[in-house]
Amino acid sequence: MQTRLAMMLVQAGLATREEIENIAAEWGPGEVELAEALVLRGQVTEELITEFLADIYSVEPVYLNETVLPDDAAGIIPEDTAREHLAVPLERDGNTVSVAMAQPVNMYAVDELKFATGCEIVVYASSPSAVRRALDEVYGRRDSLVTVESTLNDYDEHRDGVVEVATLDPGVDEDDVTDDSLITDKEEPIVRFVDKMIANAVKSECSDIHIEPYEKFLRIRYRKDGTCHEVTKLSKAVQPSILSRLKIMSSMNIAERRKAQDGRIKAKVDNRIIDFRVSAVPTVNGEKIVLRILDRGNLEFDLRQLGFPEDALKSFMAGVNAPFGIVLVTGPTGSGKTTTLYSALSSLNVPGVNIHTAEDPVEYHIDGIVQTQIDHAMGYTFAAALRSLLRQDPNIIMVGEIRDLETASIAMKAALTGHLVFSTIHTNDAPGTINRLVDIGIKPFLVASAVRTIMAQRLVKKICNYCREPFTFQESDYIGAGIDPVVMAGARTYRGKGCGRCNGTGYKGRIGLYEVLTLDKEMKQAVIDRETAGRLRLLAVQNGMRTLRMDAVEKLKNGITTLEEVTRVTADDDEEVKVAAMNYSLESQIRAVSS
């Protein structure tokens, strides 16, 4: 608690120390930030903030919502000076100018106002949010933190390709929304909050923003490094305005609240163009909205930087560089499959190669690759898209997901007729993908003939480099995790103790775990013979495949992640598989020494 306003609010029982510390961490430590955050949350009114500031700084209060500003107000103080110092001109009387300020005793600001006006300054106190609104009233609204590119819908007001987004008046019930209840540019705190929420999530390298309605409040959470963190809770009164702004920004129907909707936002944050995939789903307390942040600037196309071990990378690239066949990537949602596929395609993206994709949705736009969007409502399914793309003379095709027999059959035929096909499929591991294809209805001999490489992947949290410190696990810890302590002999392990850079978690960033299965001659025969997934897995390990758990343990030994992450993300291997891996490792060492 660094400000007198914070102390007064706590003493008055209007906020707790913990709430103020959380606001300071998210918004900043100043009085202005604290006042605006509490007003937005509905914990205090602008009038009360005005009274506190007047009391603290021994000046008179002014309530701007009850004040008529002079017609020539914009000519009294230059706009940049007024906005910089949060000062609204109230009146000029001879050689004196009266101003309402959010920071009434900022003497540097007062001196600047004197210089700009050539007059003596009389200062009044007013809440920061009221001052900002009055500044927009006097000078006109400025562009916000996030500039949203124009997308057509019924509520946009276009000007030079930039959308001015309307919001709902907080006094309007969400069930009574009509075109007449929409207002533009009047709810500056809501606009600023949404812009700040989006900008902060992007700057913090988050993957998702969750806006969640509950009975008595609206909760905002960010997902970072795979884990959701609560950012703030807002007053229920601002829920309609915030949800409406987001829906209009993403070209959704603002009046539709009973059906799920999807949309997109393209915004500029810190001079970077960021795409957002937006989903709205009705709940008992209103619509929940999730924004998936698609920052192409963070898209890493260097597969080594994604965490590939050299042996796994070599196996995977052998499939990627094959003249034809299918390369499949499997893993749960959010495991990095899209990034891996885009990275592979980018390595093949040269002028002499014709690459087409069918995606649902198109997440990142890549120059040189022709990308199409699946539209199930119009009958443009993955299967229909594949048929169409095969008539476009492609060398390489990427289909977003294989989920049914029709799509799988077309992909197999394309691979067997000279095309290189990339796709994803949902299975737990690489060997299990073969059985999944057979279960869908693909004949085993077709799987053996068409599939080149299957890769399973996961994402594991990395230890924060800023607070990493040595940590020794006990043998019992390894045994409990299914890891032979002998394997960890001599390894230096670490943990993050928590710092400001990692928000006290001890983790910062994620890295991939990879399990690459190559269908060589022996594996193809096993597929044709309909061997079980367990038998296929054992055979693959005997031939050198590193399982997800093995890759995770290797990253534990290298001080990249923790034992907790290894057990959280990967399943333990069967004893038979562990023995096979040990034998393969010993044989490899003997071969290396012999050569």
Image (cartoon, rainbow, N blue to C red):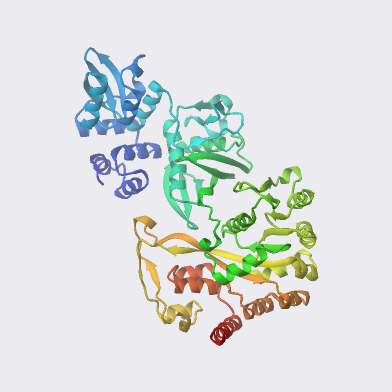
Q: Is residue 352 above or below residue 141?
A: below
Res. 68 in view: no
Please indicate whether residue 203 sits to the left or right of residue 157 in the image: left
Query: Between 151 and 41, which is closer to the camera in this rendering?
Result: 151
- The structure residue drawn at horizontal position 32% and vertical position 31%, both measured from the top left corner, is 84
Q: Is residue 212 above or below residue 433?
A: above
* Count of number-bearing discs: 0
Query: Between 171 and 519, which is closer to the camera in this rendering?
Result: 519
Q: Quadrant of the C terminus?
A: bottom right
Please indicate whether residue 559 sits to the left or right of residue 19 in the image: right
Question: Residue 521: horizontal and vertical position, in percent?
Answer: 73, 76
- The structure residue drawn at horizontal position 45% and vertical position 27%, both measured from the top left corner, is 186
Q: Quadrant of residue 580?
A: bottom right
Please indicate whether residue 304 sits to the left or right of residue 545 in the image: left
Question: Residue 572: horizontal and vertical position, in percent?
Answer: 55, 75
Residue at the outermost top position: 94
Res. 195 in view: yes
- The structure residue drawn at horizontal position 36% and vertical position 14%, both measured from the top left corner, is 71
- The structure residue drawn at horizontal position 76% and vertical position 60%, both measured from the top left corner, is 408
Question: Residue 573: horizontal and vertical position, in percent?
Answer: 57, 77
Question: Residue 348: horizontal and vertical position, in percent?
Answer: 64, 56
Q: Is residue 256 above or below residue 413?
A: above
